[in-house]
Image: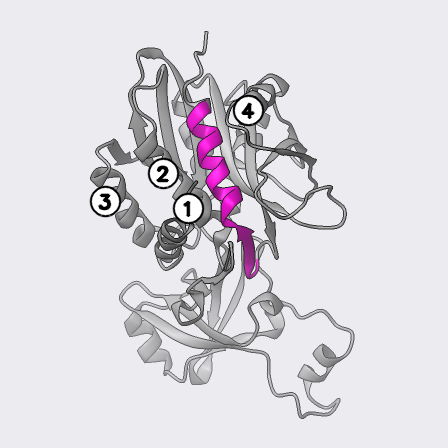
Amino acid sequence: MWDYEQLFKIIEELVMHHSPSGVETEINQFLLQQFANLGVEVWSDRADNVIAKIAGKNPDKAIAITAHKDEIGAIVKTIGDDGRVEVRKLGGSFPWVYGEGVVDLLGDNQTISGILSFGSRHVSHESPQKVQQEDTVLKWENAWIETKLTTQELAAAGIRPGSRMVIGKHRKRPVRLKDHIASYTLDNKASVAILLALAQKVKQPPVDVYLVASAKEEVGAIGALFFTQNQVLDALIALEICPLASEYPIEDGKSPVILSQDAYGLYDERLNSQLRHCAKQRDITVQLAVLSQFGSDASIAMKFGHVGSAACLAFPTQNTHGYEIAHLGAIANCIDLLTAFCQIEFE
């Protein structure tokens, strides 16, 4: 039985480290230290992945488990007068999901907090904000970030076109809902917590095991593609969230999900069978799903021919790419299932 409070705390710590796609230094430093403290070999590669290696008895074979460390957000497009900053989407982000409130602009020299703003409500049709009260979808083009700083002050902080915006730490800290955790960026900080747990639990596996906190997944699985292009693997497992929605036969709770297909293609049936067998060994009930509008490090790497065998293991999550809610038991069961998987002999 897992200590849910301990699992909650490490996820909370990960969530509180900003990591928008391509600006992931804050989480990198934390992960390098955490893996080192666990006594495993760890490094970062030229694609900004953080990689931990657990040496196996047969170094001629290798598997990898990935969990992307980047989060969605926005990217600065223009800096206008009176401290107003315009941004556009970075990954699958929507302004209405964040709502008006504190966001952080990650400058080259300083992080600046601002207010994601949509304009006043007490207006008539003479104001452009009126259409958002009726039937027009709110887009990033209709929003701005109010900083109350001058253009010169923003420039001094290193805020420029290309700077990243993420939900403010002021609003980021997770909350506990009984056995669930609720937070922004559980996609994919909770999966990174699984990697840290595996680094602690997996000892002397039959083959080399790479635990990859992958970079820039939300903008095209860039880190995973680099890693899989340069490392021969016998199997690749991506850790992910699985959206809870009426169109999918997935239930909330402790049962992880094994994907058969997503928008990028089919997953490997033999590998999925091995995962189901490992779940049975550990007396873990799993769910099966076919998803649309979804991709992972594994399916993208397999589509481009970087790996021959790939799978995706996920935990059911509400409000994906928003204020996400997931059962801590499903995250814990992913750890137990993959601990068993890491003991498989690959011929």
The residue identified by callout 1 is 69
Three-letter code for the amino acid on which mark 3 is drawn: Gln
Q: Earlier in the sequence, mark 4 or mark 2?
A: 2
Q: CA distance from mark 2 to mark 1?
A: 15 Å
Q: Nearer the viewer, residue 56 or 74?
A: 56
Label 2 SS: helix
The residue at the point 55 percent across, 32 percent down is 284
Q: Earlier in the sequence, mark 3 or mark 1?
A: 3
Colour theme: one colour
The residue identified by callout 2 is 197
Q: CA distance from mark 3 to mark 1?
A: 15 Å
Q: Earlier in the sequence, mark 2 or mark 1?
A: 1
Three-letter code for the amino acid on which mark 4 is drawn: Leu
Asked whether disc 1 touches disc 4, contact meaning CB atoms under 8 Å apart, the reply is: no
Q: Is residue 338 magenta?
A: yes
The residue identified by callout 3 is 33
164 horizontally vs 44: left or right: right
Q: Does the magenta stretch mainly form a helix, a strand or a loop?
A: helix
Which callout, 1 or 4, points to the residue nearer the camera?
A: 4
Q: Is residue 23 above or below residue 249?
A: below
- Image quarter for residue 51? top left
Query: What residue range appears in magenta?
Result: 322-340
1 horizontally vs 220: left or right: left
The residue at the point 54 percent across, 29 percent down is 283
For the N terminus, the image quarter is: top left
Q: Earlier in the sequence, mark 1 or mark 4?
A: 1
